[in-house]
Image: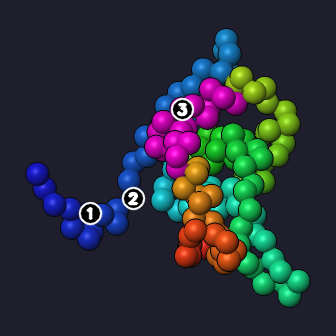
Amino acid sequence: MKTLNRVELLQKEELEKVEVKLAEGQIVYVRQMTGHERDSFEQSLLKEVKNTKGEVTGYDRALNDFRAKLAVATVCDENGKAVFLPEDYKLLSINMSAAKLEKIVNVAQKLNAISEQDKEEILKNSVVGQADNSSSDSAEKLE
């Protein structure tokens, strides 16, 4: 077994992509995300909560359009290049059938090791300042 060195670890990795059949004669490609893309995706699932002074005091769930956000982050062309802009998630969610979106999401979750437990961890670690009655001492803000 070979231990990778710094140069090898910093080289651009070939991301796995999978062809997904949406309907007869309709395919898309879904790919793995980079670490940066995964962080951005996870951040999109959180909404800042601000106090009256405008200071961020924590985060609330923003799981609306989860499927479309994940599809936007992972659908690519045959060369692995993203086909959507980040802001396309809303229109995709409105216009694509739930059945087709679910096919994309199932593959994207598998390729990117995203489980229901991962979603819960994102939300559990999303509060900057816990309430006094919280059993948790602190949590880190996702950047």
Choose top left, top right, bottom left or bottom right for residue 65: top right
What residue did someone put label 3 on?
107
Residue type, numbered disc 1: Glu
Would residue 57 be found to the left or right of residue 91 on screen? Answer: left
Choose top left, top right, bottom left or bottom right for residue 123: bottom right
Of residues 26 and 74, the one nearer the viewer is 74
Residue type, numbered disc 2: Lys
Answer with mark 3 or mark 2, whichever residue precedes in sequence. 2
Residue at 60% x, 20% y is 21
The segment highlighted magenta reads 101-118
Residue 71 percent coordinates (x, y)? 65, 41
Please determine whether, in this image, residue 10 is positioned above or below residue 110. below
Nearer to us of marks 3 and 1 is: 3
Nearer to us of marks 3 and 2 is: 3
> Residue farthest to the right?
52
Would residue 83 be found to the left or right of residue 121 on screen? Answer: right
What residue did someone put label 2 on?
12
Residue type, numbered disc 3: Val
Q: CA distance from mark 2 to mark 1?
A: 9 Å
Q: How many marks?
A: 3
